[in-house]
Image (cartoon, helix red, strand yellow):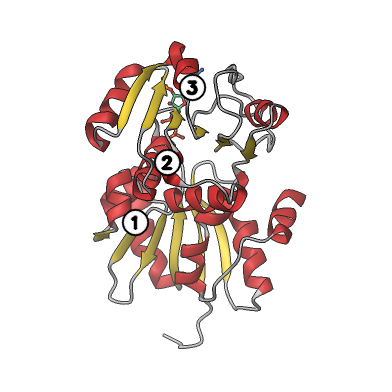
Amino acid sequence: MSAARIPLAGVIGSPVAHSLSPKVHGYWLAEHNLPGHYIPMDVASDDLQTVFRTLPRLGFKGVNVTIPHKERALSLADRVSDRAAVIGAANTITFQADGSIHADNTDGVGFIENLRAGAPDWTAETGPAVVLGAGGAARAVLAALLDAGVPEIRLANRTRVRGDALRSEFGPKVTVTDWHRVGEALSGAALVVNTTSLGMDGSAPLSLSLDPLPKTAVVTDIVYTPLETQLLADARARGNVAVDGLGMLLHQAVPGFTRWFGGRPKVSPDLRAAVLAG
Ligand code: ATR
């Protein structure tokens, strides 16, 4: 094998054409003048294992995995980071020099970095966080918020049993609120996070009155199509700091890029503009 082999990485999903990750990594490769390519790959679930075994032989240093492969990717790994184990899914796979597969999950750290960048005055200790949703994204957000030191998480999900299951798993700092009573949970909260698909282009709207929410609270949405969801627009209109979800996608990409291509990429306004420019 040639020492000068060009490093490769990519994103595996199905479908994958909509993924913004190739733009993010392509931007950083050009910005840092590094050799490498980042490729979108549409892979069926049944082929994932074979693909994981084959890619390192082609010069791949690693891959991002997205829907619907995040849980399966975790199960195929030889080593799993603590945070990927807690979240129960992988989004960043690294093929080690010894041939083993390392699985990590950077969604939670991407969420927190985005929050800290967009709401520099927010601190975890300030007060309770309200989290809407109990899917895979909620797991990453819960893990990250608890790790950051949030004292209480009020979780509301349409299907209550999914919320209860997360409470059993993540512990007593998580309290579960009925979906139709989420308004009450906003009282005294320091942070609101939407992890549901509500408000996304093509999905139903999220109808939530923010009236009980303190004006000092930060509101964030992991939905980024549209960039300004109704939730964020409502929050901004009443004076709350609102943080959009695109930054989570940008920040979660940093650790993978560093591992596969080297360098320390930054999430800059220019990167955001380049990704949004399409
Ligand atoms: P992901 O892994 O991306 O978080 P998911 O596991 O499908 O995706 O979870 C989607 C979340 O959006 C869930 O919390 C889901 O609520 P349910 O657990 O009740 O399904 C929530 N969601 C989706 N459509 C919704 C709707 N119309 N009203 C309320 N919640 C909705």
Q: Quadrant of the N terminus?
A: bottom left
Residue 185 sits in quarter: top left
Q: Nearer the viewer, residue 117 or 5?
A: 117
Q: Secondary structure at mark 1?
A: helix
Q: Amino acid at mark 1?
A: Thr
Q: Is residue 20 visible?
A: no
Closest to the camera, between mark 1 and mark 2, is: 2
Label 3 sits on residue: 187
Please say whether residue 96 is visible from this viewpoint: yes
Residue 55 in percent (x, y) is at 41, 65
Q: Earlier in the sequence, mark 2 or mark 3?
A: 2
The vertical placement of 51 against 224, above or below, is below
Disc 2 element: helix
Measuring from the top left, give residue 154's x and y in whole percent.
39, 27
**Residue 263: % across, % down:** 54, 76
At 40% from the left and 31% from the top, the residue drawn is 135
- Residue depicted at x 56% and y 34%: 217
Q: Nearer the viewer, residue 158 or 212?
A: 212
Label 1 vs 2, first from the N-terminus: 1
Query: Circle 1 is placed at which residue position?
Result: 50
Nearest the eye: 199 or 109:
109
Left or right of 8: which side holds 145?
Answer: left
Q: Of tags 1 and 3, which is closer to the observer?
A: 3
Of badges 2 and 3, the one in the foreground is: 3
Ligand 1: does it lie within 8 Å of the C-beta at label 3? no
- Farthest right residue in view: 277
* Marks 1/3: CA–CA distance: 50 Å
Q: Is residue 150 left or right of residue 223?
A: left
Comes first in the chain, label 1 or label 3: 1
